[in-house]
């Protein structure tokens, strides 16, 4: 099956001529692997989703888990970001930066534990990564704070913010993924 220019192994979930519905469209996921490496050869990103039917956890229960994890992620983000910003002071958004780079580390750790070590079930991984981590990290705040620097003519701060969060995020994602492989 080819979707959006990517080839996915296995039959299309709609190969029988069955039109997509809310139920069957949500019950299939693509299978692809993308690897990016630094020039030194360090493994940075391994993304693999298997095409499978996921009927092992009822959808309402999974949605409730994602919602509860999301609320915990939001509260964690607010608490940690506020604490770091208060301790660091100044107008640089250290709270957002720390939350985002810690989020990258945890995402790499949890993703690798689930996808390569099978230490976390597919359902638990969806709840943790989509619910908790989706609410914990905050790309929109990162963009907003960077935009505020540019509007104020503080291009150096804007560049530092983008560079720091992107580079630190990539490195900590790789560190989390590497740590998961050690266990």
Image (cartoon, rainbow, N blue to C red):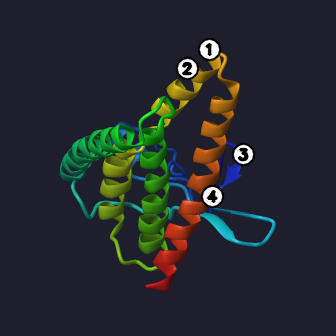
Marks 2/1: CA–CA distance: 5 Å
Q: Label 4, on which residue? A: 8
Residue in the picture at 29% in, 60% down: 55
Contact? badges 3 and 4 (CB < 8 Å): no
Q: Residue 136 at what x, y percent from top left?
A: 36, 45
Q: Point out which mark residue 151 bears.
A: 1
Q: Residues within 10 Å of mark 2 (few under 14, many from 20)?
A: some
Q: Secondary structure at mark 1?
A: helix
Contact? badges 2 and 1 (CB < 8 Å): yes
Marks 1/3: CA–CA distance: 37 Å
Between label 3 and label 2, give the one nearer the viewer: 2
Q: Label 3, on which residue? A: 5
Q: Residue lying furthest right in this view? A: 39
Q: Residues within 10 Å of mark 4 (few under 14, many from 20)?
A: some
Give the camera-side residue of 70 and 15.
70
Residue in the picture at 26% in, 43% down: 79
Q: Residues within 10 Å of mark 3 (few under 14, many from 20)?
A: few
Q: Secondary structure at mark 4?
A: loop
- State which tag comes first along the sequence, 1 or 4: 4
Residue in the picture at 54% in, 51% down: 15
Q: Residue 20 at what x, y percent from top left?
A: 45, 39
- State which tag comes first along the sequence, 3 or 2: 3
Q: Label 2, on which residue? A: 148
Marks 3/4: CA–CA distance: 10 Å
Between label 1 and label 4, give the one nearer the viewer: 1
Q: Secondary structure at mark 2?
A: helix
Contact? badges 3 and 2 (CB < 8 Å): no
Q: Residue 81 at what x, y percent from top left?
A: 35, 41
């Amino acid at each position: 099956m080819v979707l959006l220019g990517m080839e996915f192994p296995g039959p299309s979930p709609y190969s029988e001529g069955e039109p997509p519905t809310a139920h069957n469209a949500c019950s299939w996921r693509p299978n692809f692997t993308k690897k990016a490496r630094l020039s030194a050869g360090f493994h940075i990103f391994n993304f693999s989703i298997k095409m499978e039917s996921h009927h092992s956890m009822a959808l309402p229960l999974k949605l409730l888990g994602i919602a509860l994890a999301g609320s915990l992620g939001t509260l964690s983000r607010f608490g940690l970001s506020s604490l770091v910003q208060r301790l660091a002071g100044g107008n640089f958004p250290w709270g957002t930066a720390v939350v985002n780079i810690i989020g990258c580390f945890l995402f790499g750790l949890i993703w690798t534990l689930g996808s390569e070590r099978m230490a976390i079930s597919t359902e638990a991984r969806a709840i943790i990564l989509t619910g908790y981590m989706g609410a914990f990290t905050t790309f929109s705040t990162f963009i907003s704070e960077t935009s505020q620097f540019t509007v104020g003519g503080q291009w150096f701060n804007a560049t530092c913010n983008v560079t720091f969060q992107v580079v630190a995020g990539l490195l900590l994602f790789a560190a989390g993924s590497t740590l998961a492989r050690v266990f």
